[in-house]
Each structure stands twice: as structure tokens, then as C-alpha cells.
Image: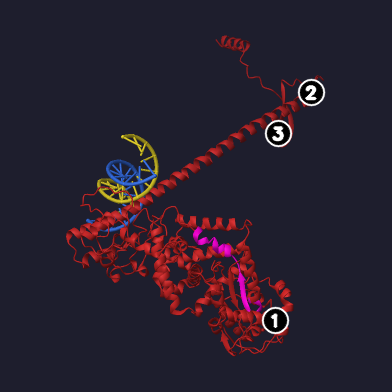
Chain colours: A red, B yellow, C blue
Amino acid sequence: MQKKYFTEGLIQLTIFLSLVGVRVDIDSYLTGYYSPLAEINLGPSSAYTQTPFHVLRDTLDGYGVHPKCPELDYFFASRRLLDEVRTLGSPRFHTQLNAWLVHQVSSTGPSTSNNPDTSAGLESTENEAGEASEHLPVRGQDVHCQPNYELAQGPCGAGAFLSEDEVTIKEEEEAVPLTQLADSSTLEHESLLEGITTLSEPDHVPAATDINWNNLLSVADLDVLDSLVTDRLLELDSDISSAISQDVSLHDAMVANVGAFGPASGSVESRTVGQQQRTLLWLESTNSSLSDSLPGMAVGLAALPFASVCNLTGNMTSQGALGDCLDEAVFDQINQLGLEGLDTIDNQLNYLECLDSRAFEDLDSDSGLSLESSYGCPVSPGSSEMSSSSSLYCEEEGGATGYSSEVDFKPSKGIIDRSTMWPPVDLSESVWHDHSYSSPPLLSRPSLSLPCKTEEPEEDIGPQLEERELSRDEMRARAMFIPFSVLQIVNMPVEEFMEVLDSHSFSPEQVTLLRDIRRRGKNKLAAQNCRKRKLDAITGLEEEVERLQAQRDRLLREKRLTAKTMGAVAHQFKQLTRDVLSRLRDASGRPLNPERFTLQCGANGRIAVQPIRQPAVTTSAGKKTDKRKKEKKQ
DNA sequence: AGCCCCTGTCATACC
DNA sequence: TCGGTATGACAGGGG
């Protein structure tokens, strides 16, 4: 009930904001509530690592992923099922508020109806923006009307940035045809402009003014906003109903309605979630650039675009393809603007650090070698030594412990200060060697960690990390003062491994241990892959057995049916033959005996009557005649 | 306690 | 020859 009232309030607020020129979209509050990020789960096993899933950062939907990756299949299957479930007509209350900012460019001058054919929507937009600008304290400047992050967190913020970029686009539209818009398609912009301008009226076209949305944002507290709304309502009091009736494009104009606007718009949760999702959006559209500037983050958040995509696809049912395309363009433009600046990057980095650690905890790997990168992450002290091919070489050996001829080291909790002995992993230098049947640990992390970020306090991370038991090889390596983690040792290329052996002047025991660790790690992965292949083979064989059994049953049924049909046909033929023969007469005028004659259909289509050959010709009389012939010869 | 499953490890063959 | 992979076998842990 509260949500219903809240939703209605949001709708009203949306209308008000739209009337003052603020593009507002409320959607998928519930969608955000049931965040797909929480529903995108991991695959059944995350054990098989070393896959370069960081390349996924450039593939929004994960296309091009290693075809053997079962986890991704599970991921996409889950996402597809999720979308299908959402399309079943469950009640959706679009309660998330995404603020769209309408911008007026002063340089273009008042956009009158001189050019109605090309810029009708633009005209309306400018009109509306001009109306909004009447209430702004500063004229002739760009006003960044970003109605604070309580209203526009994450994607909402993205929506605000979009409007900034839309300004640029509109400026371009003044000079160039619509078909020459920069990055986004013309359709997207036109649709966007149409959506923006549905509430505008040509009668209220003021002189064009630049609206500094940033300034507006700076003053975008509720008081100012309320004043704007009030003034605007006074102006358009009589037109509210019509405006509401025209406000059909709010929904379409939504950028990325990730659940950022919770019931407590100013609460920490909503802010956090919004920040996360803003990060998601940012990452989604700047995969390439981000990977250049922040490669580690790009690697660590290779799955974030999936989360965003999932959320977007979840909204596709209500928004259509336009919203998706719009999102694509919007994110690119947002990222090009770089409005967030270093603060955004810092926030994202901080978020990613927490995100990675949390995700790694959640993804408690069974196989150890693959997914343990967060537990202290012992790594080479010199990242340069590990170079670009080094991976997340942290290991957990949570499973069984086989015997070993070497000295076993019992895990000693908290004895070794990992922070000093094992520098943190540089994710930017991570390379996952692709062995078949690999899973994306990095890919999966955000999906799990995102919903957990606000659920558990961060102070729990430290003790968990410290209490984490080390694998035996890890303990051996540390006991031998080997400055590399097991995962590093295992995953580094052989050339690099040789260089490490040569350049560190290890003792023979250390070299032996290093080789053993590498061999065991490789073999561990191989065993995992082998077992998975075996299971897959068993599964495939079982499926084939079922298929063959079904085929056999079908063929047996067909055989029985065919035999039955053949019997019926033979009976009909026999009846027909009797009927025909009974109508025929021999040379003496007697009817033919159906038992002694039959009908033969020739190749030329002619039907002939042939006597039935008696097989038992060799009677006693015949034998007698043969004997007589022999006697005559003698 | 026994069973079953999972996992790590070793040995071995193969590439 | 060496490194890596594949796989059967064994052992241990855990449900």
C-alpha cells in the first residue's frame, strides 16, 4: 500500500518535473528492487579459470566468449529466463525516477517554427527548456539541471548527463542535418527529442537561453525545485491535464532504470546503489576506454556490463528497442563527457576494490586455483616481474588434500602477515590462460557482490581474509620464502616461469617446489577439466541413449503400422484379383479359377493373366517318366 | 561405520 | 628433452 502511494507520488512528481522542463522517467523501481544483479548468479562451478574473460568487457552481451564456457551459457540462460519471467505480465510499477534534463542552447537563438520540418521536436524541446529557464537565476549560461542524486542516482544520473549530451546533439542539429548526428542514430535522438517535447507548447516559447544544468544542479535542492514546479504549475495550471495526457513518452525516454530511487531517496542505500549502477553504466559504455585507463578495473568488472545489460533487457519489455538503443548512445556520450571526473573514477575504484573482495569471498572456489584471488592475494612483490601474463594467482585449496612426499605445513591462521609478505594483485596485469572448460571468476564476481555490498558490513572482510586457510602449496611456498603465489606460479607462461627461476637465484629446493607447485596446479586444472568432460560425456551419452530409445520406439511403431497397412493392401489386392478373374473366361468359355491364375502388372502398365506355377511338380509320376527315359537309354 | 561424492594428487601416456 | 595435457587411480574430507 505504501508503495502504491509512493508510486503515485512519484508519478505526480514526474509530471511536475516534466512541466518545469525536467525530463523525468519513473520506471522499474520494482525492477531495481528485484535487481537482476542479484539474480544473475554464477555457474555451477567456478573452478575452471584461466579464461581471458576480461575480453568480455568489449562484448556487451558476452558474444565471443569461449564457446566451451558452461557458466556463460548458464548466465545467458538465466538472463533469458529472467526476461521471460518478467514478460509474463507481472505487475510492474515504474517507481524509479530518472531525471531527464532538457536543455536550451542560447547560441542557437529562439527556435521558432521557421524550420518545422526538420526540428519540430527540437523546437518543442527548446521551448520547454526556455520555459524552465525563465525560473533560473542565471541566464545565458548552461544550467546543469541535475536534480540531485537522490532523484537521479546511477542511471538517473546518467540520464542527466545524457541531457547534457543531448544539448550537444541539438547544437549539432542546428548546424547539420539530423542524419549527421555524431554517435547516436538519428532515430534515437528524434525519439528522444519527441519524448522530451511532448509536454512543451509552442505558445510558451521564450527567448532562447542557455541553461547551465550544472548550476541548476548545484541549486537543485528541493526548495528550488519546488519553486520551479510551483511557478510552472501556475503557468500551466490549465494545461496539466493535457500535459499529462501527452506524457506518454516518459517511459520511452528512460535511459537505464536501474533501481536507484528507493523509497528513501536520500538514504544511504539508494545512494550506494545508485553509485553502483552509475558505475555500471559508465563501465558499460566505456569498456574500451576504461580498459585502457583502468585496466584492472576493467578486468575485474568484466561482468558488470552483463549486469547492466540484464537490467536493461529486463526493461526492454516495457521500453522497446528504442530504449535500448538510446541507452547505448547515451552511455557513450556520457562517457565522452567525462563529467564525473576523477571523483567518479576514485569512487569507482573504491567501489571496485570492495566489490572484488566481496565477490571473491562469495565465490568461494572449490578448486582453489581459480577463484581465490581475494584472499590476501599473494602476488609477486614486483608486478613487473609477473608482467602482463600474470594472473590472479591466489589459491585456495579447500578440497581434499592428497598425500605429498614433501613436508606438509599445517595452515596457521594469521601467522603470516600477508599484507607485508604478499603484495596485492595487480588486476590490470591479469591474463587468464584459456584452458577449455573455464569459468569467468571475474565475470561472476560483480553479479554476486553487487547485491551483497549493502547487506554486509565491510569490516567482516578483514577477518575472513585473515582466517582464510592456505593451501598446502601456498604454505610450502611461504615457508620456502618464495615470493609468488600459487596462482602466479601456475598461471604464468612458461617463459616467464623460466625467467623467474633464473632471475631469483632460488635454491634447488625452491626450484623443485616451484616446479611441483606449477605441475600440481596445472594438473589440478586438468583434472577438473577432465572430470567435467567426463560428466559432460556421460550426460551426452545418457541423452543419446534416451534419444535412441525414443527413435527405436518410433521405428517399431512405424514397422507395426507398415505391416498392418501392407496386410490390408494385400487383402484388398487379393479381393480385387478374385473379382477380376471371376469376370474373365477361358477359351472354352469357363470362368477362370482364381486359385490357379493371378494378375501380373507389367512395366508398361498392362495387366496380364498368368497361371500360378505349382511348385510341387516333382511328383511320383514324373519320377517314373525319368526312370523310363533312363531305361530306354540303357 | 559405511557409502557416496568431490577434490587434490600422483603416475603415466601422449602430444 | 621438456612442458603441458589427459586420464585412471588413489586418498582424504565432508555430507
Q: Position of residue A497 (x, y in %)?
A: 27, 63
Do the residues indicated by labels 3 and 1 lie within the same chain of the protein?
yes
The image quadrant of residue A573 is top right
* Numbered mark located on residue A602 in the image: 3
Task: Determine crowd level at label 1: few under 14, some 14-19, many 20+ residues with C-alpha closer than 10 A.
Answer: few
The subunit letter for the residue under badge 1 reads A
Q: Position of residue A199 (x, y in %)?
A: 69, 77
Residue A279 falls left or right of residue A377? right
Say if A612 sits above or below A389 in the image.
above
Which of discs 2 and 1 lies nearer the camera? The answer is: 1
Distance of label 3 from label 1 (alpha carbons): 100 Å
Q: Quadrant of the C terminus of chain A?
A: top right
Q: Is residue A616 magenta?
A: no
Say if A133 sits above or below A183 in the image.
below
Q: Secondary structure at mark 1?
A: helix
Note whether residue A251 is visible. no
* Numbered mark located on residue A582 in the image: 2
Q: Position of residue A72 (x, y in %)?
A: 47, 57
Distance of label 2 from label 1 (alpha carbons): 106 Å
Distance of label 2 from label 3 (alpha carbons): 20 Å
User: What residue type is disc 2 on?
Assistant: Ser
Q: Position of residue A78 (x, y in %)?
A: 52, 56
Which residue: 56% across, 11% down?
A630
Tag 2 near tag 1, CB within 8 Å:
no
Q: Nearer the viewer, residue A389 or A470?
A: A470
Do the residues indicated by labels 2 and 3 lie within the same chain of the protein?
yes
| Mark 3 or mark 1, earlier in chain | 1
- The span shown in magenta is A17-39
Task: Determine crowd level at label 2: few under 14, some 14-19, many 20+ residues with C-alpha closer than 10 A.
Answer: some
